Image: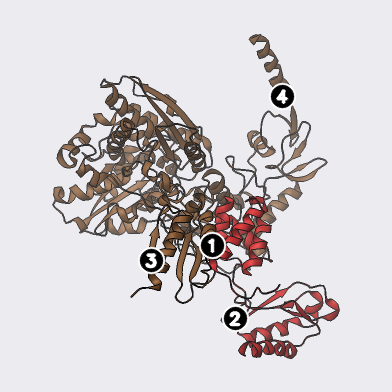
Amino acid sequence: MLKEMKTIEGNMTTTEATKTLTIDGREVPFNGERNLLELIRKAGIDLPTFCYHSDLSVYGACRLCLVDIQGRGVQGACSTPPEAGLKVRTQTEEIREIRKITIELLLANHDQQCPTCPKSSACQLQDIARKLGIRKVRFKPVHQLAELDLSSVSLVRDPNKCVLCGDCVRFCDEIQGVGAIDFAHRGHEAAVLPAFGKGLGEGECINCGQCAAVCPTGALTPRPEVDEVWRALNDPVKTVVVQVAPAVRVAIGEAFGLPSGMSATGQIVAALKRLGFDKVYDTAFSADLTVVEEANEFLKRKAKGEKLPQFTSCCPGWVKFAEQYFPDLLPNLSTCKSPQQMLGSVCKATLPSEMGIPKENLIMVSIMPCTAKKFEAKRPEFAQDGVPDVDHVLTTQELARMIEEAGFRFKELEPESFDMPLGFKTGAGVIFGNSGGVSEAVLRYAAEAVTGRKLGNPDFLSVRGEDGIRLATVTLDGVELKLAVVQGLKNARTLVEKVRRGECQLDLIEVMACPGGCIGGAGQPVTREREVKRLRTRGLYEADKNLDLHKSQENHHVTEMYQKYLGEIGGRKAHHLLHTHYQNRRRIADERMVFGDGPEGDKVKVSVCAGTNCFLKGSQEVLSEVLQCVDAQQLQDQVEVSASFCFEKCDQGPTVRVDGQQLQNCTGKGACAAMRERLKNKVAPE
Amino acid sequence: MTAKRKPESTGRRFVKVCHILDQHDHNPSRLVPILQAVQEEYRYLPQEVLTYVATALGVSPARVFGVATFYAHFTILPKGKHLVRLCDGTACHVKDSVPILRALQKRLGVDDRRKTTEDMLFTVETVACLGACGLAPVVVIDDQVYGQQTPESAVKLVETLITQEAQ
């Protein structure tokens, strides 16, 4: 029976595979390709596109991948599925002409400051214009230059470079589930804008930077901090230390012609020392520290059965996302700082006395694959007396640029080693850069902590993989741990909603905003190839194998750190340096709304919060009840009822304010009672 | 159109927004009619209300802002008490509608970008063809149509309203 089915299946696939169509006169078989563009590329022809991205929905807006289909005329290859017998031509005179005009028109409205553009040499518009042989733009530019959006600490938005391909819009919406930017206005005024034309830094943007990673031009780019770092390096008074995140080592080589995934740790350290950094540390060290703290926190919660599932907290994109949309789940986030911030606070707390320098002269720089880390480093809770734990964050791209500026031949650099003790790590710290890495590192710790026995093979393959949501169950001496590994915040939202509805019982949820985890971060060298991410992932797992130790608890420098400075794991001192707290955030920064006019005269003012979370918790009903109460008792002249936006007490919503008094978890009855009370006091104050 | 002048309490207006959303089953594909109804209520689309509508429909505020700015019918800026619309369709244009526009703008102290007076009494807009080409050039003030206008006559219409408002 089984055999039979197999042969039938086999036959089916052969008939499928024999379907063919013709591309430029050659017969090409197809099987499962989603559209002509995929097939044409498979056939070895790189049609130009801006708006096609294999991970996103088909948009068909840029009109560059046009092909001529016999009997149908000119069509977009990206939005045409393959059909047997089609006769497709990719290079007719008509198509060549259309492509050229399209690029010319885009260039006419493009701020053509290529040599000073951060995307120069990685820009697709530049590349396509060169490939199509555009030598002259015949159309006059009519656009007035718009101002740069510098409101975000992570990203720069330059509207003058936008080609309206919508890749950023679709990534933000379809993969991250945020929708911080979208098309606004129309015709020649059309633009990609955050809500209400505000700055990127004033809205829902979670700073993941994937919009910049998919942007074909320089319209969205990571916000550089290179100049500040050069200044610190050239300041004789400052001692500048640097930490390098795991994911950086397997990607930076791409900027210098090395294969993706090849670990270039030695060259990175050598380059950093030559640039003038006094100490070079490894963020993987503090990742080990994070594992110890976070795994302990997790096992404690598991034993008590409280605040589960525990969410990881090392991805700053996810943390801001959770603060905006899941205030009720903030207690479930691990209170551990991210490895970047742990190393920052440890350095600022211990190095000045060890090195005998004043604290203000110590500068901490971190090299990150991530744009959201720039935002994280500037969060007010990560500064002591106004001095940030991490002063500057450079992306992998920025470090590559500094190395280029200095003129070092990266490939030829003699490898050097990290400084001790904060440069010492185990493989568990290194795999943090992969999606699933944090979970695996925690499991390697938990396995020994729960069973009390040495763990033989440290690999937990069940949490590895490429799926957006991966579920795994690990049983340790009868203790069942249920884990989920999520990448992409839309997936995170889907899973959180399942957890909220009780459809999914989980103990630990790892969330990484970027597909692939940190190796796919927006600070990494720009790539459109999926394979590149796979190679980087493999590179980190290989780096783990190439180290002698694979479990954070085996990192003796971490143990020493506890003995010397931190005291007990999860203890008071450790808490002070290694843990943090979260805040509720409204979606739009300056929104403090009142629907309509302010209150008149001497009325009692009742405002019911209509922010996202209060809305979900039934604030609309509360408001109706209050209004009914006002009508029934004819208090219209004494009470002004309004709906207002987010008081940032979302976890205890619905929130109602009666004059100065704030009521949490408020019901309609509660609000009415408070209102009557207030009226009574107002009538007879003396 | 009766007795709607008195501004309603903010809470009540908000309940109306909720009502509009309910009428459309909180369906995001009904966004355009929802925005039309909200604009009917507020005479423009206030930012806060748009954010609320986005929240209630489960779409991002940026998407709602995109729709609100795409259609000429929607306005995200508050309009004045009196809406002065000048036709600049082909017929009115060749019959010199532009000097009328400039005269009105000059009299009211507005321009192509800032269309509403500071005292929120007037908004001056152009529209493309009102279909009253026989009366070109045409000015419409608060749904009242005035044909064959000159810069002087149009300014006089506005001045009459200013005098009325001053009383």
Query: Distance from label 1 to label 4 (Cα)?
Result: 65 Å
Q: Are marks 4 and 3 in contact (CB under 8 Å)?
A: no
Chain letter for mark 2: B
Q: Is residue B118 above or below residue A274?
A: below
Location of residue A133 in the rendering, given as x and y in whole percent from the top left corner = 64, 52
- Of the chain colours in the picture, the one used for chain A is brown
Location of residue B95 in the rendering, given as x and y in whole percent from the top left corner = 80, 82
Is residue A227 in sight in this rendering? yes
Chain letter for mark 1: A
The residue that label 2 is drawn on is B117
The residue that label 4 is drawn on is A16
The amino acid beneath tag 4 is Glu
Numbered badge on residue A627: 1
The quadrant where residue A34 appears: top right
Give the label, 2 or 4, closer to the camera.
Answer: 2
User: Where's the N terminus of chain A, which quadrant?
Assistant: top right
Query: Distance from label 1 to label 2 (Cα)?
Result: 34 Å
The amino acid beneath tag 2 is Thr
Give the label, 1 or 2, closer to the camera.
Answer: 1
Location of residue B139 in the rendering, given as x and y in whole percent from the top left corner = 75, 80
Numbered badge on residue A321: none
Q: Residue at x 54, y 42 (%)?
A: A528
Disc 4 is placed on an element classified as: helix
The quadrant where residue A47 appears: top right
For the residues beneath circles 3 and 2, the answer to whether they share a chain is no
